[in-house]
Image (cartoon, rainbow, N blue to C red):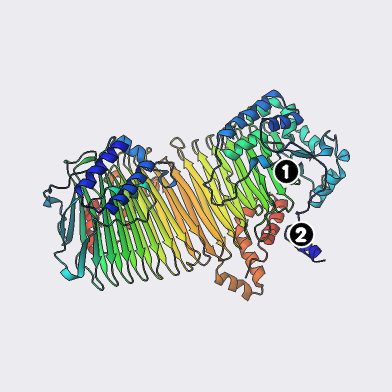
Amino acid sequence: MKEQLQKDFKNIIESLTLSQKDIEIKKFYLDNFISRGFPNRKEEDWKFSDLKQIINKNIGEMSFYTDYTTTNKVDTSVYVDGLEHNKIVFINGRIEKIDFDYEKKDQIEIIDQSETINKFNNTNSLSDLNSAFTNKSFKIAVKKDYQLVKPLIIYHTTNSKIWSKNINLRLNFELSENSCLRLIDLYSDNSEKNFLNIFYNFDLKKDSILKNYKVDKFKNKNIKYSFNNIEQDKNSISETFILSSGSNFFKNEINCNLNGKYSSAFVNGIFSLNNSNHHEIRTIINHLTENTKSYQLIKSVLENNSKAVYQGKIFVNSNAQKTDGYQLSKAILLNKDAEFNAKPELEIYADDVKCSHGSASGNLNENSIFYLMSRGLSYQQSRELLINGFLLDVVEKITDPEVKNLIKNMIGIKE
Amino acid sequence: MDNRQKEIDNLKDYKYGFTTDIENTRAPKGLNENVIRFISNIKKEPQWMLDFRLRAYERFKQLKEPDWQKPKYPKIDYQDLYYYSAPKSMKDKPKNLDELDPKLLETYKKLGIPLQEQKRLNGIAVDAVFDSVSVATTFREELTKQGIIFCPISEAIQNHPELVKKYLGSVIPVTDHFFATLNSAVFTDGSFAYIPEGVRCPMELSTYFRINASKTGQFERTLIVADKGSYVSYLEGCTAPMRDENQLHAANVELVALDDAEIKYSTVQNWYPGDKDGKGGIYNFVTKRGLCKGKNSKISWTQVETGSAITWKYPSCILKGDNSVGEFYSIAITNNHQKADTGTKMIHLGKNTKSKIISKGISAGSSDMTYRGLVDISTKATNSNNYTQCDSLLMSNKCGAHTVPYIKNKNSESNIAHEATTSKISEEQLYYCQQRGLNAEEAVSLIVNGFCKEVLQQLPMEFAVEAQKLVGISLEGSVG
């Protein structure tokens, strides 16, 4: 892999116009990655999902360089109907379109940051990989007091032109005081055997609100890793919803720092897995100051020999008194080969706190099925009804009505 | 005068902190093959036992000390320890208690464990381990009548080699982790109990461990085998003198329960916790593992952990037999600069296996407490159940309480439920108690005892009273 990395790195450097200093920084990250490699199960954070093994099994040899000089045709059929929205379209990792048609032009600033490499608050080797190989990186800044009229949908599309490739993306968001952004990440893939490595950084200033919905619904054979770093100032709110379903492997990581008083973070997630899918959500909520709040709810429905992993950590600093932290994960295993692993962790250094977590996993309740069948539903119908009800609980947590409907339609939950 | 006052004050904190001035036989300092041969030789062990030790030592040399635990400690120099220390008077084993060194008798009397049987509360047989040797075992005749073997493990190696050979290392193999392997190589003494088929042990069996010599590690090994349909309840207590240095205690405890057998293992651990500034104290790195080998067997661990500078242990159950049951009840209290990283592992292998974990952690002062546990239901463990509850109570704003459970469910017909909470004693509860005439300290002690009740209930009666007092003492001065 080392030769491949060095060769591809050379190509990347040639295709970009970088200063000598930046090349050196990128080189530094490359060397870091070469010495560390893909994370494996020996690392505590990857204990349940050995990425190295998964990549070997699903992809094998991989190349890290993609030619971004030619444009791809935007396939408008992937656009979401029935919801007016702003768009950013990535095709095979190349930004093809940025379009804020519905917004006031002077309230949103898009800054090309490709030439400045900012460090990420992440210690795993994938951030090194990302820093070494990203070719374009943008910062999207929402101005003070501006609330976006329409949600922004980021389309992560891939097509059959790429094969056995590693794609690295990186975006920075800055939400100024009292601003609001609704962001939907929509993954749709027509490709196979690629590894997507996505890094987002959100900077939430005072009173701002971020709602991020990640939807991985469509079936595909790619491997994905997504990392969200969220910095929150006073009174800010972040809401993250993850629908984890389509890809062969997907690990979503959320690292949230509650830096300001009265800030709060919500993470809700659904695993709806089939076949031999293997997905993971890992959250770290750092309560760093007084009166902060976090709430997490993760529900899984696992069929065939799928595997879901939830690692959630609530950290409470010694001066973060009056913290309220809550975390619940529930899983239904529908098949005897399905597997659910959880590591709900509390690390608490302050005494005046209220923190709790719960985790439960098991089968569908036979009594409930019996009850429904005795009222005339077939076994299949009862099962669906119960599963829908189980998942609806999480979908109902979505605070945005438009997006809630969109997601309900997507997973076919009827009320 | 000042010094004397200080001494008295110290004793008030930890009343078992005295040392017994007694002449010792020691192994040469350090860890090498010769020391292992020395230990084996002094214990007059057969060749197979020496081979067992050497095999473990070979393995130990390849292992690296683990460092993933939460409480960090300065590196231990394993060459700067004595691995064997015994009172000189024990060289030729006294035949009965009358021949026992009066100094030893005195020590145990001070600890509240009178060895003379007539003075003993009826119903508990004690094996007293002093540094590296077992000094006395009481009530042996009465137990022998029932066919129960209860003796120091060094005697068992000589008198019941077939049993020891069969079960020693069957739960904790010589190739286990760092500290377990170290123990396999250098273990000195400990207790052995065998309950024959269909026998319900008529009294509580108990071991009392005492570290006395300085610069010595204690490595005892306990092996309890409950044959088909038998029952035994076993208690373990421990204390050590107050010293400025940290002493290592790395014991191995193996339990084997065959078909329909039940073992109940209770520990009240009160090693010296170090002084108020965190100086001295015992490193309690213990490996405890029970194997529910047969059908319908049951192993239950109950522990009250109040002592030690660092406690690092996970009493575990391997539920191999169908319908077997594993239980774990724990109270861990840390005060001042104590640190604890403790919990359990429940490994479900057989069908219809059940496990229950109740863990209560209380941290005060500048201490740090971690619950770390594993529940693993394998693909074959159909219809298994686990229930886990771990609650933590924080009593100061300088302490920490952490929960790190690992939950693995690989079987759709099995259920796992896990709950954990962390909080402080609520103002309302305190207010309610004080309103009814209790002072602050009494109110806290009442609430804490209520918090621990579920676990204290599991202890045998005499122990429960002791443990309740211990809970009170450990938290003294931490209110306010």
* Residue beneath the point at 12% across and 51% down: A74
Which quarter of the image is occupied by the N terminus of chain B?
A: bottom right
Q: Are marks 2 and 1 in contact (CB under 8 Å)?
A: no
* Residue beneath the point at 59% across and 61% down: B366
Disc 2: CA contacts within 10 A as few (<14), some (14-19) or many (>=20): some
* Residue beneath the point at 50% across and 56% down: B420
Q: In the image, are marks 2 and 1 on the same chain?
A: yes
Picture coordinates of residue A347, whole percent (x, y): 49, 57
Quick one: B384 or B110, which is closer to the camera?
B110
- In which quarter of the view is residue A108 placed? bottom left
Is residue A22 in view? yes
Residue B306 vertical position relative to residue A234 in the rendered view, above or below: above
Residue A177 vertical position relative to residue A70 in the rendered view, above or below: below
Q: Is residue A414 left or right of residue A311?
A: left
Picture coordinates of residue A29, whole percent (x, y): 34, 48
The residue tagged 1 is: B206
Q: Dot 2 falls on which chain?
A: B
Three-letter amino acid code at the position of disc 1: Ser
- In which quarter of the view is residue B193 placed? top right
* Residue beneath the point at 64% across and 71% down: B440
